[in-house]
């Protein structure tokens, strides 16, 4: 089970610092401990509770073979989210959100397919069949696509959840997730509307250490869930083979039964002797 950081570790990571009081979102009030020097302070005990809920949910998704898309487009989160996503084998997006990624996934999938095809052409040397100008154009296209699509190559269907830092910055992603019914696991600072997230992690979404602490925990929870998924797959495969063997054995026994059993049973029954028919007046004439 993923080990949560202590309250002291959270304090050291600066997870408790919110935004200035004047910038708060009233719906975050339940997660706020108080105000210090005009800055809201988050209640880390509540953060611990909500973080555990989010991690349990995340682990459960991974344990069922689901996909979580890491979305960290703000500067402080880009390298952290990329590293955490790579650590647990999940797709990630750390540049600007691609409009329609969720609401028009078929188009996004087409672009991803084109990106993979061009990559393969470059890697295999197939690109050499084109003119030099065409080769340069293809390489430029791939370089441009790299920036936005490199982290999405293993996304072959709509993600089962989004893990987002700063939902204000990622408002388009949030809107698309809400339209398509994709759950959101969100790091929510004091200036964010927590009702937009399915699972709220009340924490500082600006401090690098705060973001890294949470992203690392998410990656750990996913890896634990994926390990359970692999174990369950092995058990299910063994059970499936056992059922198949049992079925084959049963079918074999059924086919090997003698077909003459009903005849034998009939032969074993005593045959009643015919009694002579009594003569009547009509039959005797």
Image (cartoon, rainbow, N blue to C red):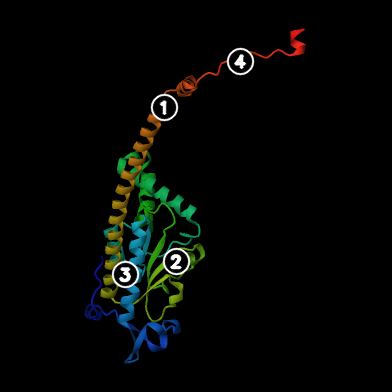
Q: Earlier in the sequence, mark 3 or mark 2?
A: 3
Residue 35 showing in the rendered view: yes
**Residue where numbered disc 4 is placed:** 275
Of the two numbered discs 1 and 4 in the rendering, the one whose residue sits closer to the viewer: 4
CA gap between label 2 and label 1 equals 60 Å
Of the two numbered discs 2 and 4 in the rendering, the one whose residue sits closer to the viewer: 4
**Residue where numbered disc 1 is placed:** 255
Q: Residues within 10 Å of mark 1 (few under 14, many from 20)?
A: few
Of the two numbered discs 2 and 1 in the rendering, the one whose residue sits closer to the viewer: 1
Of the two numbered discs 4 and 3 in the rendering, the one whose residue sits closer to the viewer: 4
Q: Which mark is residue 173?
A: 2
- Asked which secondary structure carries label 4, the reply is loop
CA gap between label 2 and label 4 equals 95 Å
**Residue ranking furthest to the bottom:** 37
Q: Earlier in the sequence, mark 2 or mark 1?
A: 2
In which image quadrant can residue 221 be found?
A: bottom left
Q: Residues within 10 Å of mark 3 (few under 14, many from 20)?
A: many
Q: Residues within 10 Å of mark 2 (few under 14, many from 20)?
A: many
Q: Which mark is residue 220?
A: none
x, y percent for residue 285: 77, 7
**Residue where numbered disc 3 is placed:** 77
Which residue is painted at 44% across and 66% down in the image? 173
- Asked which secondary structure carries label 2, the reply is helix
CA gap between label 4 and label 3 equals 104 Å
CA gap between label 3 and label 2 equals 16 Å
Q: Nearer the viewer, residue 91 or 7?
A: 7
Q: Is residue 91 above or below residue 240?
A: below
x, y percent for residue 10: 25, 78
Which residue is painted at 41% across and 72% down in the image? 167
């Amino acid at each position: 089970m993923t080990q949560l950081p202590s309250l002291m570790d959270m304090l050291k990571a600066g997870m408790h610092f919110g935004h200035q009081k004047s910038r708060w979102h009233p719906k975050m009030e339940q997660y706020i401990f108080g105000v210090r020097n005009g800055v809201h302070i988050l209640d880390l005990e509540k953060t611990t509770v909500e973080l555990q809920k989010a991690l349990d949910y995340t682990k459960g998704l991974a344990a069922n073979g689901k996909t979580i898309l890491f979305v960290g487009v703000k500067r402080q989160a880009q390298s952290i989210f990329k590293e955490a996503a790579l650590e647990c084998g999940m797709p990630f997006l750390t540049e600007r959100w691609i409009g329609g990624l969720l609401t028009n996934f078929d188009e996004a999938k087409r672009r991803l397919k084109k990106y993979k095809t061009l990559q393969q052409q470059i890697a295999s040397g197939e690109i050499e069949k084109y003119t030099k100008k065409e080769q340069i154009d293809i390489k430029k296209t791939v370089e441009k696509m790299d920036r936005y699509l490199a982290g999405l190559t293993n996304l072959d269907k709509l993600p089962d959840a989004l893990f987002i830092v700063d939902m204000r910055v990622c408002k388009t992603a949030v809107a698309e997730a809400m339209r398509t019914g994709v759950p959101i696991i969100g790091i929510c600072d004091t200036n964010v509307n927590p009702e937009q997230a399915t699972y709220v992690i009340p924490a500082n979404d600006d401090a690098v250490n705060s973001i890294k602490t949470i992203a690392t925990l998410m990656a750990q929870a996913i890896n634990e869930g994926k390990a359970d998924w692999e174990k369950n797959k092995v058990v299910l495969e063994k059970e499936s083979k056992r059922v198949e063997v049992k079925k084959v054995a049963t079918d074999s026994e059924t086919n090997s039964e003698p077909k003459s059993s009903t005849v034998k049973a009939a032969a074993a029954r005593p045959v009643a002797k015919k009694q002579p028919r009594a003569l009547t007046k009509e039959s005797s004439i």
